[in-house]
Amino acid sequence: MSKGFQTDGLSGLLRKEIFEQDIHALVPLDRRVRIRRDEQSGKDRRGERSLSLCYLDGDNFKSINDEEGHDTGDHVISELGRIIRESIKPSDRAYRLGGDEFAVVALDLPDVMMYGTRLAKAVKEHEFKYKGKIIPMTISVGIATHIPMDGYVDAEELKEEADNLCYESKGYRKQNHGKGRVTILIPKTKEIIQSGEI
Protein backbone atom coordinates (compact mmCIF):
# COMPACT_ATOMS: atom_id res chain seq x y z
CA MET A 1 0.00 0.00 0.00
CA SER A 2 1.47 3.36 -1.01
CA LYS A 3 2.22 6.03 1.58
CA GLY A 4 -0.08 8.46 -0.24
CA PHE A 5 -3.03 6.11 0.15
CA GLN A 6 -2.30 5.61 3.85
CA THR A 7 -2.09 9.32 4.66
CA ASP A 8 -4.88 11.88 4.90
CA GLY A 9 -4.03 14.68 2.49
CA LEU A 10 -5.23 17.51 4.74
CA SER A 11 -3.82 16.59 8.16
CA GLY A 12 -0.84 14.51 7.10
CA LEU A 13 -1.95 11.82 9.57
CA LEU A 14 -2.84 8.23 8.80
CA ARG A 15 -6.33 7.61 7.40
CA LYS A 16 -9.25 6.01 9.23
CA GLU A 17 -8.93 2.81 7.19
CA ILE A 18 -5.38 2.35 8.48
CA PHE A 19 -6.57 3.03 12.04
CA GLU A 20 -9.14 0.25 11.79
CA GLN A 21 -6.51 -2.18 10.51
CA ASP A 22 -4.02 -1.23 13.20
CA ILE A 23 -6.34 -1.27 16.20
CA HIS A 24 -7.86 -4.64 15.29
CA ALA A 25 -4.37 -6.08 14.81
CA LEU A 26 -3.19 -4.81 18.21
CA VAL A 27 -6.16 -5.72 20.44
CA PRO A 28 -6.14 -8.03 22.30
CA LEU A 29 -2.55 -7.02 23.09
CA ASP A 30 0.28 -9.55 23.14
CA ARG A 31 0.53 -10.86 26.70
CA ARG A 32 4.32 -11.08 26.72
CA VAL A 33 5.94 -9.32 29.67
CA ARG A 34 7.52 -6.01 28.75
CA ILE A 35 11.15 -5.48 29.70
CA ARG A 36 12.47 -1.92 29.74
CA ARG A 37 15.73 -0.30 30.78
CA ASP A 38 15.52 1.93 33.85
CA GLU A 39 17.56 5.02 32.97
CA GLN A 40 18.55 5.83 36.56
CA SER A 41 19.60 2.40 37.79
CA GLY A 42 20.67 0.95 34.43
CA LYS A 43 18.78 -2.24 35.29
CA ASP A 44 16.06 -4.02 33.34
CA ARG A 45 12.57 -3.80 34.82
CA ARG A 46 9.70 -6.11 34.01
CA GLY A 47 6.17 -4.77 33.73
CA GLU A 48 2.81 -5.24 32.05
CA ARG A 49 2.37 -4.15 28.48
CA SER A 50 -0.31 -1.56 27.80
CA LEU A 51 -1.98 0.04 24.81
CA SER A 52 -3.59 3.47 25.16
CA LEU A 53 -6.15 4.68 22.65
CA CYS A 54 -6.50 8.46 22.66
CA TYR A 55 -9.49 10.09 21.00
CA LEU A 56 -9.11 13.80 20.29
CA ASP A 57 -12.05 15.96 19.21
CA GLY A 58 -11.88 19.61 18.20
CA ASP A 59 -14.02 21.99 20.24
CA ASN A 60 -16.41 24.32 18.39
CA PHE A 61 -14.98 23.32 15.02
CA LYS A 62 -18.39 23.49 13.32
CA SER A 63 -18.71 27.16 14.26
CA ILE A 64 -15.28 27.81 12.71
CA ASN A 65 -16.44 26.33 9.43
CA ASP A 66 -19.79 28.12 9.58
CA GLU A 67 -18.48 31.53 10.60
CA GLU A 68 -15.02 31.66 9.02
CA GLY A 69 -15.46 29.39 6.01
CA HIS A 70 -14.17 25.98 4.99
CA ASP A 71 -10.76 27.29 3.89
CA THR A 72 -10.15 28.40 7.47
CA GLY A 73 -11.43 25.06 8.75
CA ASP A 74 -9.07 23.20 6.42
CA HIS A 75 -6.16 25.31 7.68
CA VAL A 76 -7.06 24.44 11.29
CA ILE A 77 -7.19 20.71 10.46
CA SER A 78 -3.80 20.92 8.76
CA GLU A 79 -2.31 22.67 11.78
CA LEU A 80 -3.90 20.20 14.20
CA GLY A 81 -2.33 17.34 12.28
CA ARG A 82 1.10 18.94 12.50
CA ILE A 83 0.75 19.66 16.24
CA ILE A 84 -0.30 16.07 16.97
CA ARG A 85 2.62 14.67 14.93
CA GLU A 86 5.08 16.88 16.79
CA SER A 87 3.63 16.06 20.23
CA ILE A 88 3.79 12.25 20.16
CA LYS A 89 6.60 9.71 20.36
CA PRO A 90 8.13 8.33 17.13
CA SER A 91 6.68 4.90 17.96
CA ASP A 92 3.12 6.25 18.35
CA ARG A 93 0.60 6.18 15.50
CA ALA A 94 -1.69 9.16 14.80
CA TYR A 95 -4.80 9.14 12.61
CA ARG A 96 -7.48 11.45 11.32
CA LEU A 97 -10.82 9.68 11.72
CA GLY A 98 -12.83 12.35 9.91
CA GLY A 99 -13.79 16.00 10.33
CA ASP A 100 -12.09 17.26 13.48
CA GLU A 101 -11.79 13.81 15.08
CA PHE A 102 -8.38 12.24 15.59
CA ALA A 103 -6.89 9.21 17.31
CA VAL A 104 -3.48 8.26 18.67
CA VAL A 105 -2.38 4.73 19.55
CA ALA A 106 0.49 4.56 22.06
CA LEU A 107 2.12 1.58 23.73
CA ASP A 108 3.39 1.42 27.32
CA LEU A 109 2.73 5.00 28.45
CA PRO A 110 4.18 5.70 31.92
CA ASP A 111 1.64 8.49 32.63
CA VAL A 112 -1.53 8.52 30.57
CA MET A 113 -2.96 11.74 32.00
CA MET A 114 0.29 13.61 31.41
CA TYR A 115 0.34 12.36 27.81
CA GLY A 116 -3.22 13.55 27.11
CA THR A 117 -2.62 16.86 28.88
CA ARG A 118 0.47 17.49 26.77
CA LEU A 119 -1.55 17.00 23.58
CA ALA A 120 -4.39 19.26 24.71
CA LYS A 121 -1.98 21.93 25.97
CA ALA A 122 -0.01 21.94 22.71
CA VAL A 123 -3.20 22.71 20.79
CA LYS A 124 -4.42 25.38 23.19
CA GLU A 125 -1.08 27.19 23.24
CA HIS A 126 -0.71 27.18 19.45
CA GLU A 127 -1.75 30.35 17.62
CA PHE A 128 -4.07 29.29 14.83
CA LYS A 129 -3.91 32.14 12.36
CA TYR A 130 -5.40 32.37 8.87
CA LYS A 131 -5.33 35.43 6.63
CA GLY A 132 -4.32 37.60 9.56
CA LYS A 133 -7.11 36.40 11.86
CA ILE A 134 -6.48 34.38 15.03
CA ILE A 135 -8.79 31.36 15.43
CA PRO A 136 -9.27 30.14 19.04
CA MET A 137 -9.00 26.34 19.16
CA THR A 138 -8.96 23.65 21.84
CA ILE A 139 -9.44 19.88 21.86
CA SER A 140 -11.10 17.45 24.23
CA VAL A 141 -9.32 14.16 24.88
CA GLY A 142 -10.50 10.74 26.06
CA ILE A 143 -8.02 7.92 26.72
CA ALA A 144 -8.84 4.26 27.31
CA THR A 145 -5.98 1.90 28.17
CA HIS A 146 -5.92 -1.83 27.49
CA ILE A 147 -3.68 -4.24 29.41
CA PRO A 148 -3.53 -8.02 28.91
CA MET A 149 -5.64 -10.20 31.24
CA ASP A 150 -7.43 -7.13 32.64
CA GLY A 151 -8.44 -5.14 29.60
CA TYR A 152 -11.05 -4.97 26.87
CA VAL A 153 -12.54 -7.93 25.04
CA ASP A 154 -11.81 -6.53 21.61
CA ALA A 155 -10.94 -3.41 19.64
CA GLU A 156 -14.56 -2.29 19.33
CA GLU A 157 -15.00 -2.21 23.11
CA LEU A 158 -11.78 -0.20 23.50
CA LYS A 159 -12.90 2.28 20.82
CA GLU A 160 -16.29 2.71 22.46
CA GLU A 161 -14.69 3.42 25.83
CA ALA A 162 -12.29 6.01 24.38
CA ASP A 163 -15.19 7.68 22.59
CA ASN A 164 -17.25 7.80 25.80
CA LEU A 165 -14.34 9.33 27.71
CA CYS A 166 -13.87 11.98 25.03
CA TYR A 167 -17.60 12.71 25.31
CA GLU A 168 -17.11 13.20 29.05
CA SER A 169 -14.27 15.64 28.38
CA LYS A 170 -16.60 17.83 26.36
CA GLY A 171 -18.82 18.15 29.42
CA TYR A 172 -22.04 17.05 27.73
CA ARG A 173 -23.16 15.14 30.83
CA LYS A 174 -22.18 17.82 33.35
CA GLN A 175 -23.44 21.34 32.83
CA ASN A 176 -20.79 22.82 35.10
CA HIS A 177 -17.94 21.37 33.03
CA GLY A 178 -16.56 22.97 29.91
CA LYS A 179 -14.67 21.52 26.98
CA GLY A 180 -10.91 21.29 26.51
CA ARG A 181 -10.36 18.59 29.13
CA VAL A 182 -8.72 15.19 29.36
CA THR A 183 -10.58 12.17 30.74
CA ILE A 184 -8.94 8.79 31.35
CA LEU A 185 -10.01 5.46 32.79
CA ILE A 186 -7.67 3.52 35.11
CA PRO A 187 -7.68 -0.07 33.77
CA LYS A 188 -7.47 -2.04 37.03
CA THR A 189 -9.82 0.04 39.18
CA LYS A 190 -12.09 1.31 36.37
CA GLU A 191 -11.88 4.74 37.99
CA ILE A 192 -12.55 7.72 35.72
CA ILE A 193 -10.26 10.70 36.23
CA GLN A 194 -10.75 14.07 34.55
CA SER A 195 -8.38 17.00 34.35
CA GLY A 196 -9.40 20.56 34.94
CA GLU A 197 -9.81 22.76 31.90
CA ILE A 198 -6.47 22.84 30.10
Image (spheres, rainbow, N blue to C red):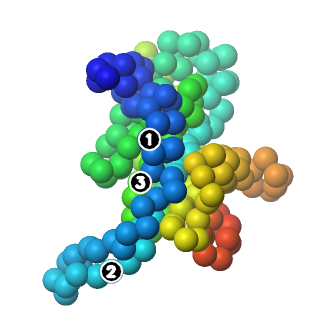
Residue type beneath disc 1:
Asp
Q: Earlier in the sequence, mark 1 or mark 2?
A: 1
| N-terminal label among 3 and 2 | 2
Q: Position of residue 48 (x, y in %)?
A: 42, 74
Q: Is residue 56 left or right of residue 125?
A: right
Q: CA distance from mark 1 to mark 2?
A: 25 Å
| Residue 121 seen anywhere in this rendered image of the structure | no
Compared across the picture, whether 149 is left or right of 166 comes to left
Q: Which residue is mark 1?
A: 22
Residue drawn at x 70%, y 50% is: 164
| Label 3 neighbour load within 10 Å: few <14, some 14-19, many 20+ | many
Do tag 1 and tag 3 residues touch (Cβ < 8 Å)? Answer: no
Determine if residue 17 is in view. Answer: yes
List x then y, in percent, for residue 99: 58, 25
Query: Outermost residue, left direction?
Result: 42
Q: Secondary structure at mark 3?
A: strand
Q: Residue at x 54, y 62 (%)?
A: 146
103, 26: nearer the viewer = 26
Q: Which residue is mark 2?
A: 46
For the residue carrying disc 2, how many other residues have a C-alpha within 10 Å: few (<14), some (14-19), or many (20+)?
few
Q: Which residue is mark 3?
A: 106
